[in-house]
Amino acid sequence: MIRQLIREMLLQEEVFGKLAFVYTGSHSQPWDVETESGIIPGFIPMIVNDDLQPGKGKGGLYGKGLYTVYDLPGTQTETGFYGKYIYKLAINLYGYLCFDMPVAAKVYGSPISVVEQAKLVGLDDELVAKIKLIMEDPGVVGKRTAVGAQAVSLLVRGIVKGLVFTGDHDGRVAVVFDASTVTPVAYRTVRSKNWKRVTKDVRQQTIGRTSAEWRPERYEENTLEKLRRAKSAVERFRRLGVTPNPEDLVINGDLDLSGGNVQGSLIPKGTGITQLPDGLHVKGKLILDPETTELPRGLRVDGYFGGYWSKIRVIPDDVQLGGGVAFPSTLLKLPENMTVTSFMMDENPNITEWPPGFFVTRGDVNLYKSHIKRLPDGFTVANDLYLADSALEELPQGLRVGGNLDIRGTDLKLRDDIEVGGFIRMKVNFWGDIPDKFRSGRKIL
């Protein structure tokens, strides 16, 4: 079936049953290029040699993978937004969640719902139930299918072969989570309208992969699924009366429980996951669901801790936060003896003191509208310090700011013993109050 279709006219635009022709844009040239410093691998050889790993080190809106369109005209792919080269690929859509019902009908034989597709491809009952809630949400029903696909992608990336949906900018989209399952068919540049066929001997090296088993681990661990397994492990060990294995509680990547933003609102919609297991270790960033009210004992987060929209009130003494932090307005007390890389806190009337032993090493310190009245002498910020509209009564002695200092909306006065590497944003009532060291060089904005 696949060989027969690939022999047909290359410019057909259609989904043929389980098979589809899709297009992707890239800056990578089609074939290897030899330079003085070595060989620059081409896009097609990377597919043939199973070396293509799109999104490595970062994820797209729907997860890491190869982003393709299956209706090229008028898309950003056709205009060169994603690169000067356009590649035509063959993929087998069976195992994808198809949010567009006409495509689902061709792939699965009838226009079955995304929920029914999830059951068909073997997702467990808990995931199916969550997908059902998302697809029945008023914010999803009647909208472009990309809305539902984005929300569901948080649950299924790394579990299904890919996603098919209609987006706002690129029309009909297929996200391929494992690029080893595609077959290169043809290529051209954005300026040229003439497709160059990939030779038969090259196609034959990849042609069986369109229906082969895929390998989700190549791109992105599904951290929500990992969390579910971790919580299950905790419950299992608790029933047995023993301590969980530490490796069962490790999330190797980011864990984003925010669920993305709701249109017209700054507050994310959440995922409904508000309780985390004791001893959880997140090696990337952790973004909390906005309805989260407490943190687990022994939590460790190596990357950014995003609790800004949450409702947590206490940070347990044994919690370890090693990256940047964003704390909510509900927090009753800042932790003592903790070192982080950056600091941000929502307006919080509960916190009026900077805790002893709390250090920020590299990034910004954002105390906008903070109720903190004093900062310790010798307070040092590597980057920017935001104190606008804060309740701070005076700048600390020996303050050191590597970037900009913002004290707009306050009565704070500059001191001779402070150092500011960048600009100072403030309202000046009388220039005589400004130390000489800050008057020259357009230091004050």
Image: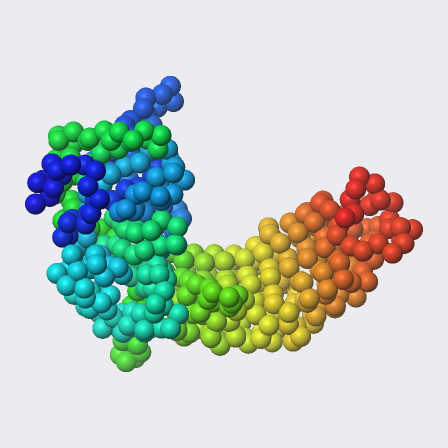
Dividing the picture into quadrants, the one containing residue 119 is bottom left
Where 436 sits versus 260, above or below? above
**Vertical arrangement, residue 24 with respect to residue 153, above or below:** above
Q: Decide if residue 78 is on the left or right side of residue 120.
A: right
Q: Residue at x 60, y 52 (%)?
A: 363
- Depth check: 361 or 131 in front? 131
Which of the 4 image quadrants contains residue 280? bottom left
Spot the residue most to the right.
432
Tell me which residue sits at (12%, 61%) in the image: 109
Q: Position of residue 233 (x, y in %)?
A: 29, 71
Task: Tell me the colour scheme of the image.
Answer: rainbow
Q: Residue furthest top?
A: 36
Residue 288 appears in the picture as rendered:
no
Q: Position of residue 143 (x, y in %)?
A: 36, 64
Q: Quadrant of the N terminus?
A: top left
The image position of residue 184, as x and y in percent, is 21, 37
Residue 13, above or below 244: above
Look at the image and tell me whether residue 225 can be seen. yes
The residue lying at 32 percent from left, 24 percent from top is 33
